[in-house]
Amino acid sequence: MLNVKRLLVTCPTACDHHQKLVRNLVSVLANKILIFNDKITHISKRTTREKLLSYLSSESIKHSSLSFDIPFDRQQLADFLCVERAAMSVELSKLQKEGLLKTNRNHFELLTL
């Protein structure tokens, strides 16, 4: 929808609107790259357990708290981590039984890591 050539070449008058548009687009792109980089970090782990722990540890750091809400329901989390929902639920149950975390829907509390 945007003419990329016109976007990448600044106006002869170097208008403020053009510069702001380019800054905003670069900012959006940079944020998407960071999100995808985080996702790759998590899904590159070998097991479902490692993927879950990687993601939950990251969210804990992001929220600066051991207790936090995630922006996904269980199916969305499984899709995000590229794992089967059933396998993920089994691992979450194991982690709770081992005393590593408590969970209620999309709220998690890490007990020890």
Image: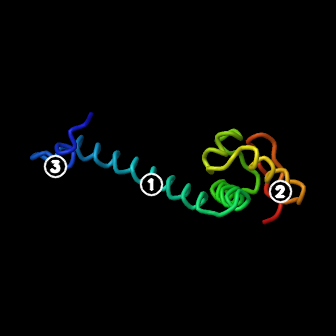
Q: CA distance from mark 1 to mark 3?
A: 23 Å
Numbered tag placed on residue 57 in the rendering: none
Query: Mark 1 sits on what residue?
Result: 33
Quarter of the figure with the C terminus = bottom right
Query: Mark 3 sits on what residue?
Result: 9
Q: Secondary structure at mark 1?
A: helix
Task: Give the vertical position of 3 relative to 64 (above or below).
Answer: above
Numbered tag placed on residue 95 in the rendering: 2
Position of 5 with respect to 52 (left or right) is: left
Position of 89 with respect to 37 (left or right) is: right
Question: Depth check: 40 or 65 in front?
Answer: 40
Task: Name the amino acid type tagged 2.
Answer: Leu
Position of 110 with respect to 36 (left or right) is: right
- Kindly identify the residue that appears in the image at 24 percent across and 40 percent down: 17
Q: If you read the primary sequence from the N terminus, does the residue marked by circle 1 or circle 3 appear first?
A: 3
Measured as percent of width and height from the top left, residue 105 is found at: 77, 40
Q: Nearer the viewer, mark 1 or mark 2?
A: 2
